[in-house]
Image (spheres, rainbow, N blue to C red):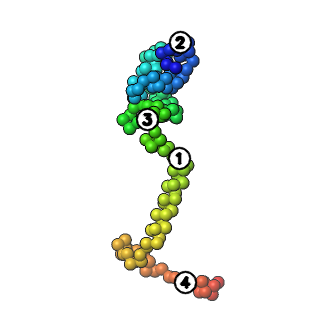
C-alpha cells in the first residue's frame, strides 16, 4: 500500500519509521537520513522544527529497525532489496568480546612459546645493580632457619 493512498488520520497513527518504510517501498531511490526524514515530516504534516529536534532519534530508530539498511554511501534502503552477500553480519557484543579474548589467549600462547632466553635487547644495566644484594635461599635452607 502506498503512503500517498493513506488518509491523514491513518498516517497519524503510524510511526515515523513505518512512514519511512512506506516511502522507501514506493520509491526505487535510496535516500540519506535528512532527505528521508524531511519526506516523513511532510507526509505526517509535522512542524519543520521537528526536523532539528527529532532527526537523531529518527536515525537511531532506522538503525535499530531490521527492515532498513544503511549503505556505504550513507543512504538508506530496504533490507529486502539486498541479497545476503551484500549485508554485513552484525556481531553481538558478547560474541565479539569472546572472539577478542580467544585471539588474545592464542597470541599469549605464541608469545610464551617463542620466548628466547638469549634476547638481551631489553636488558638494563641498572637491573644488575639493583639485584646485587639479592640472596636466593632454597626451601631446605629456609626450613633450617626456622
**Marks 2/1: CA distance?**
42 Å
Residue receiving disc 2: 7
In front of the other: label 1 or label 3?
3
* Residue 111 lies in quadrant: bottom left
Q: What kind of element bears circle 3?
A: strand
Residue pictured at 41% horizontal, 75% vertical: 116
**Marks 3/2: CA distance?**
29 Å
In front of the other: label 3 or label 4?
3
Q: Nearer the viewer, residue 80 or 113?
A: 80
Label 3 environment density (alpha carbons within 10 Å; few <14, some 14–19, many ≥20): some
Q: What kind of element bears circle 2?
A: loop
Residue pictured at 63% horizontal, 87% vertical: 144
Residue pictured at 52% horizontal, 20% vertical: 1
Residue receiving disc 1: 93
Q: Could you say which disc has been placed on residue 70 in the image?
A: 3
Label 4 environment density (alpha carbons within 10 Å; few <14, some 14–19, many ≥20): few
CB of mark 1 within 8 Å of CB of mark 3? Answer: no
Instruction: Give the mark, 4 or 1, whose residue is nearer the N terminus.
Output: 1
Instruction: Give the mark, 1 or 3, whose residue is nearer the N terminus.
Output: 3
Instruction: Give the mark, 3 or 2, whose residue is nearer the N terminus.
Output: 2
Amino acid at each position: 500500500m502506498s503512503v500517498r493512498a493513506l488518509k491523514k488520520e491513518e498516517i497519524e497513527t503510524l510511526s515515523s519509521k513505518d512512514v519511512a518504510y512506506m516511502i522507501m517501498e514506493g520509491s526505487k531511490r535510496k535516500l540519506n537520513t535528512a532527505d528521508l526524514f524531511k519526506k516523513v515530516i511532510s507526509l505526517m504534516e509535522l512542524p519543520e522544527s521537528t526536523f532539528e529536534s527529532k532527526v537523531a532519534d529518527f536515525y537511531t530508530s532506522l538503525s535499530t529497525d531490521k527492515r532498513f539498511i544503511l549503505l556505504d554511501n550513507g543512504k538508506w534502503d530496504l533490507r529486502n532489496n539486498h541479497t545476503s552477500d551484500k549485508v554485513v553480519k552484525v556481531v553481538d557484543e558478547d560474541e565479539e568480546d569472546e572472539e577478542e579474548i580467544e585471539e588474545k589467549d592464542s597470541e599469549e600462547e605464541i608469545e610464551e612459546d617463542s620466548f628466547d632466553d638469549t634476547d638481551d635487547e631489553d636488558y638494563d644495566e641498572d637491573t644488575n645493580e639493583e639485584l646485587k644484594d639479592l640472596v636466593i635461599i632454597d626451601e631446605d635452607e629456609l626450613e633450617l632457619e626456622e
